[in-house]
Amino acid sequence: MWNQPYLETCCRSALHRLTLVGRPGRPDGLKDGPCLRRLEGMGLARQREDGRFEATPAGWDRHALEIVPRKSA
């Protein structure tokens, strides 16, 4: 049974962008700002002291599970 909160398509894309940008993070004030804040509320992203957003460990796990699942060997 799936027990994760649903991610809207736009929020899935925002989470994917967070993983692509990695350590530099995403700046605040972009079009995906509402999704970044929603992800933050879900514990999948966080806003750093410098104002940029980054994926949390839970965000990385969710990304691996739902957005880019690995194929089993």
Image (cartoon, rainbow, N blue to C red):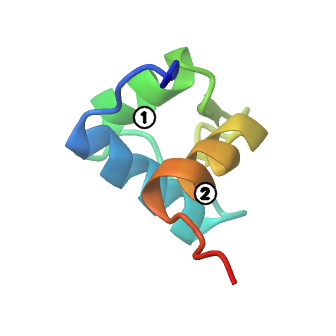
The residue shown at (43%, 24%) is: 37
Q: Is residue 46 left or right of residue 4?
A: right
Image coords of residue 52 (percent x, y) = 58, 44
Residues at marks 2 and 1 touching, judged by CB atoms closer than 8 Å = no
Res. 72 image quadrant:
bottom right
Element under disc 1:
helix
Residue lying at the far bottom of the rendered structure: 73
Q: Amino acid at mark 2?
A: Ala
Res. 58 image quadrant:
top right
Q: Estimate the spatial distance between the alpha carbons at disc 2 and disc 1, rounded to whole Å.
A: 18 Å
Depth check, front residue: 38 or 60: 60
Question: Can residue 4 be spotted in the picture?
Answer: yes
Q: Amino acid at mark 1?
A: Leu
Res. 21 image quadrant:
bottom right
Q: Which of pointers 2 and 1 lies earlier in the amino acid sequence?
A: 1
Please name the residue that numbered disc 1 is placed on.
36
Image coords of residue 45 (percent x, y) = 60, 35
Question: Can residue 32 be spotted in the picture?
Answer: no
- Residue 57 vs 34, above or below: the answer is below
Q: Is residue 45 left or right of residue 58?
A: left
Depth check, front residue: 56 or 27: 56
Please name the residue that numbered disc 2 is placed on.
64
The residue shown at (66%, 63%) is: 24
Element under disc 2:
helix
- Residue 8 vs 71, above or below: the answer is above
